[in-house]
């Protein structure tokens, strides 16, 4: 593993932790030696008020063990979450990763975003707003930022009666019911070019209602975008990888991780 931190080109007040696959010295030149790997760019949650460590490295290490390069974005929150700042930071991270694909032996055509809760909103924002006119007015760069897949855990999606109001207010900087607030309901931005998605949620989530994932899945279905959705019958919000080290041991729900890896492997035609 090669482990380091960088700030994406063109943005401030954020950083990315990189976990790169590296070739074993004894395998160099041999048949089956390491060529290049796809990548997962992780956005931890936290209501756009903080960035959760529980949804950062514990997630990254599992995708890394599956053979992926992994990157974790530590983005702006609180008062600095407005004005598309976290989305510009994520877009810049995606551009930076693809711009260094040759150096890092990374497949620039197979880069997924993965997010949880408000981080799921951020990841899904890149998948739905990457070509949005309003966002492009502030982004104003020609980099290829559309993700090739989205993995969304108990994501904040809607801006209606099922919204996680704190997240939408933080990212929009607007009050509930306003046009600026409603704009960040991502189900309304899905179209035929939205990347394929893997979603999971619990039916009893009392923080971010399951309707967020259900509405997004319905929008994807209407646009004929491939998706996979798992709704578990129990479990609270913020379960991350559902293991003891994140304080949410639940072996039943923990299957989401294995399934997401299999889903991504199938989509990317990849095996370690």
Image: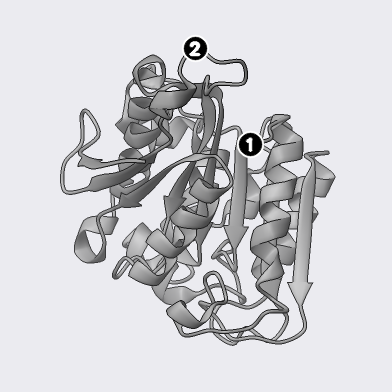
Residue at x-position 45% and y-position 18%: 28
| Residue 90: quarter of image | top left
Residue 147 seen in the figure? yes
The residue labelled by disc 2 is 29
| Number of other residues with Cα within 10 Å of mark 1, as a class: few under 14, some 14 to 19, many 20 or more | few
Residue 175 seen in the figure? no
Residue 128 lies, in percent from the top left, at 57, 41
Identify whether 183 is placed above or below 162.
above
Residue at x-position 37% and y-position 58%: 172
Residue at x-position 77% and y-position 60%: 229
| Residue 49: quarter of image | bottom left
Residue at x-position 65% and y-position 53%: 187
**Badge 2 vs badge 1, beta-carbon distance below 8 Å:** no
**Side of 255 where 11 appears, left or right:** left
Tell me the SS state at disc 2.
loop
Decide which of tag 2 and tag 1 comes sooner along the chain: 2
**Side of 258 where 69 appears, left or right:** left
Considering the image in quadrants, where does the N terminus appear?
top left
How far separated are the C-alphas under marks 2 and 1?
Answer: 18 Å
Which of 270 and 240 lies nearest the eye of the viewer? 270
**Side of 52 where 114 appears, left or right:** right
Residue 66 lies, in percent from the top left, at 59, 46
The residue labelled by disc 1 is 272
Residue 145 lies, in percent from the top left, at 46, 28
Residue 2 lies, in percent from the top left, at 31, 38
């Amino acid at each position: 593993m090669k482990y380091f931190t960088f700030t994406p080109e063109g943005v401030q007040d954020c950083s990315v932790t990189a976990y790169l696959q590296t070739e074993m010295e004894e395998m160099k030149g041999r048949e089956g030696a390491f060529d290049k790997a796809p990548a997962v760019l992780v956005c931890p949650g936290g209501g756009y008020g903080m960035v959760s460590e529980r949804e950062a490295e514990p997630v990254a290490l599992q995708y890394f063990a599956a053979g992926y390069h992994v990157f974790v974005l530590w983005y702006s929150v609180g008062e600095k979450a407005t004005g598309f700042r976290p989305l510009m930071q994520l877009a810049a991270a995606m551009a930076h990763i693809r711009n260094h694909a040759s150096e890092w032996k990374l497949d620039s055509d197979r880069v997924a975003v993965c997010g949880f809760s408000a981080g799921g909103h951020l990841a899904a924002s890149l998948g739905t707003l990457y070509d949005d006119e309003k966002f492009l007015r502030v982004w104003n760069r020609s980099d290829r930022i559309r993700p090739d897949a989205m993995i969304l855990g108990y994501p904040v999606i809607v801006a209606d009666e099922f919204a996680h109001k704190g997240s939408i207010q933080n990212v929009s900087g607007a009050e509930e019911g306003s046009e600026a607030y409603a704009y960040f309901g991502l189900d309304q931005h899905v179209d035929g070019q939205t990347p394929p998605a893997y979603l999971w949620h619990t039916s009893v989530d009392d923080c971010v209602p399951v309707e967020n994932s259900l509405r997004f899945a319905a929008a994807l279905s209407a646009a004929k975008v491939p998706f996979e959705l798992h709704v578990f019958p129990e479990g609270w919000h913020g379960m991350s990888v559902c293991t003891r080290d994140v304080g949410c041991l639940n072996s039943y729900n923990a299957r989401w991780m294995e399934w997401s890896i299999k889903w991504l492997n199938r989509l990317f035609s990849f095996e370690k």
